[in-house]
Image (spheres, rainbow, N blue to C red):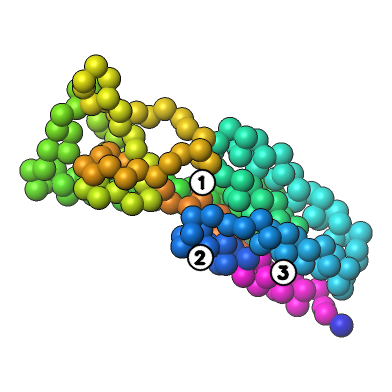
Amino acid sequence: MIGNLDLHTIRIIVALGMLVTASVLDIRKREINDMLWIGFGAIAFVMIFVGGDIWITLRTIGFAMIIVPIALVAWRFGMFGGADAFCLIVLGGLAPMASMHNSIVTPITTLTNAAILSVVPLVTNLCRNLFAMSKKQEIFKGFNETRLNKILAVFIGYRAKNPKYGFSIEKTEGGQKRLDFGLKHAENMQFCTKSETWITPGIPYILYIAGGFAIQILYGDIIINLMNGIK
């Protein structure tokens, strides 16, 4: 018989297994077969009936499913892809609000933690661009842009000599190069192949979700903990 603590740990291990598998597939192939979500979704369904009180489990999963409309709306507006939305939904069934830390977590903790992690590339881009400028490289050569747009660009992307797995953030208007910060649907964007082009890195959002879940397990909710620390 599986005890509650053991079942909780198993749920976390299975969820981490799903996230690691999805991350590896997304990095290597830049796409994830829907069978992965179907398979782990089936495991989540079976685990409802393994140990513990079924009704308590169903209530917990039901509360965790608050993430469903949020994930679907984010997918609909192109904030991330369908695989990311399915991942969050299945994760809510596999390990609903799971944590091994004495900290409050919510149905959207993984997502908010992931959003905070997504700031890391901004710092990386800034460092990359500052280094390029320190070497006297004209990273905005040929551009007719405002200072504000240039400041935004050094955070959002960088000028790549041979871009790979990045999305172009420049366009040509009237024969002049311009920066393009327009929102694009995550699933419709094509990777840039043109050399010497300003791009924003196409980092799979699954990686942020995996990181956000790991932080949830070991630390809890970053925002809630910070707010409690300020009080």
What type is the residue that disc 2 sits on?
A: Val
Residue position for label 2: 24
Q: Main secondary structure of the magenta part?
A: helix
Q: Earlier in the sequence, mark 2 or mark 1?
A: 2
Is 8 on the left or on the right of 73, as rendered? right
Q: Quadrant of residue 136?
A: top left
Q: Amino acid at mark 3?
A: Arg
- Which SS class for mark 1? helix
For disc 1, the marked residue is: 115
Residue at 48% over, 48% down? 116
Instruction: Identify which residue is drawn at 82% across, 78% down.
Output: 3
Q: Nearer the viewer, residue 135 or 42?
A: 42
Mark toward the start of the polypeptide (3 vs 2) = 3
**Three-letter amino acid code of the residue under disc 1:** Ala
Q: Real-space Cα distance between discs 1 and 3?
A: 23 Å
Foreground mark, 3 or 2?
Answer: 2
Q: Quadrant of the C terminus?
A: top right
For marks 1 and 3, the one nearer the N-term is 3
Circle 3 Cα neighbour tier, 10 Å, few/some/many (<14 / 14–19 / ≥20): many
Identify the residue at image location x=59%, y=50%: 84
Q: Residues within 10 Å of mark 1 (few under 14, many from 20)?
A: some
The reply to whether the C-beta atoms of the residues labelled 3 and 2 are less than 8 Å apart is no
Is label 2 in a helix, a strand or a loop?
Answer: helix
Residue stretch rendered in magenta on the structure: 2-17
Residue at mark 3: 11
Q: Secondary structure at mark 3?
A: helix
